[in-house]
Amino acid sequence: MKMLAKALQSFRTKVTIFFILAILFSAGAGNFILYKYSLDSQFNQLRDKLKIIAQVSALGIDANELTKIPLNPEGVKSGSYKVVAGKLKEIKESNLLIKYIYAMARTDKAGILQFVADPDPVFNSKKGLKVTAYPGDEYDARSFPQMFDAFYAPVADKKLGNDEWGMFLSGYAPIRNRQGDTIAILGVDISANDVYLSRLGLYRRGFAVLILGLILAFGLGFILSGRVTKPISELLIGTRRISQGDLDYRVKVSGADEIAQLGGSFNEMTKALVEARRKLDEYFYRVVQSMVRSLEAKDPYTRGHSDRVSEYSRQIALEMGFPAEKIDLLGKAAQLHDIGKLGVHEDILNKKGPLSEGEWDILHKHPASGEEILKPVFLDSEMLSVIRSHHERFDGSGYPDKLKAEEINIFAQIASAADAYDAMTSSRSYRPALNREEAQKRLQEGSGTQFSPRVVEAFIRALNKRDNERSF
C-alpha cells in the first residue's frame, strides 16, 4: 500500500493520468468524427442516386420538341410544351422522391437561366399561391454554380439548398439532341426536409455529447492539472521573487513527490543565498566603512564624523519608535552617508577658504555619487535614500533633487539632522565648534526650514536623555 501511495504521489503518475484522460477524450472525439463521416457517406450516396435519376429522366425528354416551345407565357399552350410537360409529369409520378422536375436553358445573361418547361407552375410560397416558371421566366442561378456544370455532365448539389421553393436537394443532367449538343438541362428536386431534420438532430445530439465531454474533460483536467501545475507555479513565483531580490520568500509546496522535493531544495537554496548575501553585504560594508574612515583620517576636523552621525541617527530613530531592524540599517547607512566624497578631490574637501561656484557644483554631486556606489549591493531603497537625500532641506531648497517636506524619506531627514548637529559641534578649519546648547538652538531655528520638526523634537529629547544619564 505504501508503494502504491508513493507511486500515486509521483509527478510522473499524475502526468500519465492526465494524458490518459486526454487520450480518452480524443477517442470520443474520433468516434464522433467517424459518425459524422458515416452520415456524409449516406448523403453522398443520395447525391449519386439523384444524379442517376436526373440522367435517366433526361434521356426520356425529346430535345426536338423542347426546342419548339415558345419562350413566353403563351408557350404553355403549345403542343410541344404539352408533350414535354406530360413526359415530365410521367417521370415525376413514377418516382415518389421527386418533388419538382423541370427543364431550363441558357440565356445571354451571366448567371441567369430560363425555364423551358415546368409541369407545376403553381406552388405554395410564404406569401401564398404563386404562379411562375412559365417558359422564358428567368432564374438567378449564381448561387448554384453546379447548375451550369450540368450542361456537360450529371451533377448534384453538394449541400442542401434553400430558396423560395423550400429546402431541397437537387440533381441536374444535360438534355442533348441527336447530334449530342446540350440544348437544356433537366432539374430534379427532392424534398430535403427529412434529410435536413435528420442531420440537424444528429448535429444537436453530437454537439450535446461534445459539450458534455468537454465539460467532463475540462473539469477532470482542471482539477488534475491544478494539482500538477500549482507547485510548479509556486516555484515559478519563488524564482521571480528571488530574482527581484526578495531572498526571504519561501515556496509552499506540500506532498512527497519530486516537485515537493524540488520545493524543499529551493527553500534550502534561498537560505544559503540569504547567508551568502549577508556575508557579502557585511564584507562590502566593512570595505566601504574602511574607505570612509580612510577619507576622514586625511582631515583631522572630520575624523570620527561618520561614527557620530551613525550614533545620533540611531538615537533619533529609537526615540521616534522605529523597530530595531530599521534602526540598525539606518545606523549602517548613516555611517556611509559621505561615501560619495571619494569622488571629490582633496583640495576641495580640505579647502580653508570659500568654495567657488564650480567647486560647490562638484561637492553637491557627492550624494548621488554615493548612491551609485552603494546601489549594486545596498538594495534597500529606504537606506539608499539616506545616502542620496541627506542634504535635502525640509523647505525644498536642498540638493540634489530639491525634495520638500514628506517627499524626503524619514530616514534621510534623520541623517540630515544628525549630520548637521555633528558638523556644528565639531571644529572646522574655518570656525570653532559650537557648544551643545547653541547647536540645539540652531537645530530648533532650522525646524520647518532645513529640518523636519518632528525629527528635531525627537533629537532634542534624545540629547536631553543622554545628558541626564551622564549627570548621574
Image: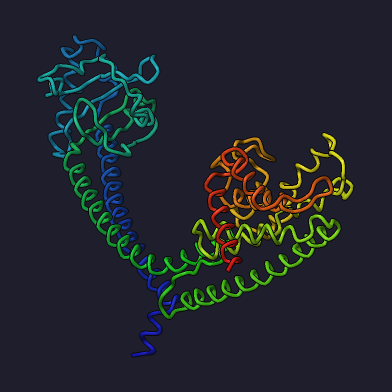
Taking 60 as reference, is 27 above or below it? below
- Which residue is at the front of the view, 422 or 4? 422
- Which residue is at the front of the view, 137 or 467? 467
Residue 363: x and y in percent read 79, 43
Residue 411: x and y in percent read 58, 52
Horizontal relation, residue 431 to residue 14: left or right: right
Q: Quadrant of the C terminus?
A: bottom right
Q: Residue at 28% of width from left, 41% of height from top?
A: 52
Q: Residue at 25% of width from left, 53% of height from top?
A: 206
Horizontal relation, residue 378 to residue 106: left or right: right
Residue 212: x and y in percent read 25, 57
Q: Residue at 73% of width from left, 67% of height from top?
A: 286
Taking 172 as reference, is 437 above or below it? below
Residue lying furthest left: 128
Figure label count? 0
Horizontal relation, residue 235 to residue 170: left or right: right
Taking 404 as reference, is 12 above or below it? below
